[in-house]
Image (cartoon, helix red, strand yellow):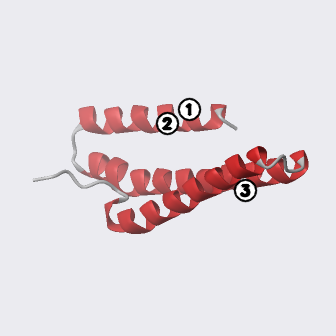
Amino acid sequence: MQQSHGYSADKDALTKRLHRVEGQVRGIERMVEDDRYCIDILTQIGAVSTALESLAFELLDAHVNHCVKHALESGSKQDATAKAEELLAAVRRFAKTR
């Protein structure tokens, strides 16, 4: 049996969002190739960053409400501690990118 993740129920929607972001990045590449105005390019880069950040928060929420929640409910102190440490490490990585 394949392991279920917190985002599994929304996988199709997440994939579509990632494809839109991918299209935005390709659009930025075309803007550079076409020698577009730098501020316009920066605006599009900001939009991509915002889209990815929104996606990251959604995944983080799913992780907390599925993976971490299940570890806490399992009664296993080892599992709960591992998921809590994993969550904190993810938050630290995410915070460093901002």
Q: Which residue is mark 3?
A: 47
**x, y percentage for residue 54?**
60, 57
Give the residue type that dot 1 points to: Arg
Q: As shown in the figure, which amino acid type bears the numbered disc 3?
A: Ala
Task: For the C terminus, give its image quadrant.
Answer: top right
Q: Which residue is mark 2?
A: 90
Q: Residues within 10 Å of mark 2 (few under 14, many from 20)?
A: few
Q: What residue lies at 79% left-to-right and 49% top-to-bottom?
A: 34
Would you identify the image quadrant in which residue 81 lies? top left
Contact, mark 1 vs mark 3 (Cβ under 8 Å): no
Q: Are marks 2 and 1 in contact (CB under 8 Å)?
A: yes
84 vs 35: above or below: above
> Residue at position x 68%, y 47% from top?
29
Mark found first going from the N terminus, 3 or 2: 3
Q: Residue at x 70, y 51 (%)?
A: 30
Disc 2 residue type (three-letter):
Ala
* Element at label 2: helix
Residue 12, image x and y in percent?
38, 67
For the residues labelled 1 and 3, the Cα–Cα distance comes to 21 Å
Q: Mark 1 vs mark 3: which is more N-terminal?
A: 3
Is residue 74 depicted above or below 81 in this figure?
Answer: below
Residue that mark 1 sits on: 93
Front-lying residue, 68 or 96 = 96
Which sits in the foreground, 54 or 18?
Answer: 18
As measured in the structure, the alpha-carbon distance from the residue carrying label 3 to the one carrying label 2 is 23 Å
Q: CA distance from mark 2 to mark 1?
A: 5 Å
